[in-house]
């Protein structure tokens, strides 16, 4: 689980001061708990890409709306960060952007 100190509002600034390795570490720590659960990272990415529209997210992923809700709840449980909140949007947005820049695919 990601601790609150890892995902505090200061984390992105601290990571930026540490250079690219520090920034990547923040992204890895936030997304790492999702790696063992197929579909969770892709669900968060689709949720953000679909402007928080759960129905569109479900259509994009070709899953039921309840599946999207269950996956997003599991993301919150595993990371301690809720993708429905402004803080969650910021943290997951940064983490997923760095994830994509590094050439990693959302599973």
Image (cartoon, rainbow, N blue to C red):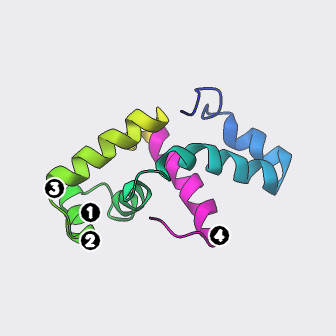
What residue is disc 4 on? Answer: 101
Residue at the right extreme, as displayed = 18
What residue is disc 3 on? Answer: 65
**Magenta highlight on residue 33:** no
- Position of 75 with respect to 91 (left or right) is left
Is residue 39 visible in the rendered image? The answer is yes
Q: How many marks?
A: 4
Q: Are marks 2 and 1 in contact (CB under 8 Å)?
A: yes
- x then y, percent, for residue 27: 63, 50
Question: What residue lies at 24% left-to-right and 45% top-to-bottom?
Answer: 70
- x then y, percent, for residue 18: 84, 46
Is 56 placed above or below 95 here?
A: below
What residue is disc 2 on? Answer: 60
Is 19 placed above or below 60 here?
A: above
Q: Secondary structure at mark 3?
A: helix
Front-lying residue, 10 or 99: 99
């Amino acid at each position: 689980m990601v601790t609150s100190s890892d995902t505090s509002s200061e984390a992105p600034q601290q990571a930026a001061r540490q250079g690219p390795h520090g920034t990547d570490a923040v992204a890895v720590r936030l997304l790492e708990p999702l790696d063992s659960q197929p579909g969770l990272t892709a669900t968060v990415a689709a949720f953000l890409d679909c402007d928080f529209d759960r129905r569109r997210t479900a259509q994009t992923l070709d899953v039921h709306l309840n599946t999207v809700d269950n996956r997003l709840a599991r993301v919150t449980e595993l990371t301690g960060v809720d993708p429905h909140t402004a803080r969650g949007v910021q943290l997951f947005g940064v983490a997923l952007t760095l994830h994509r820049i590094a050439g990693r695919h959302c599973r």
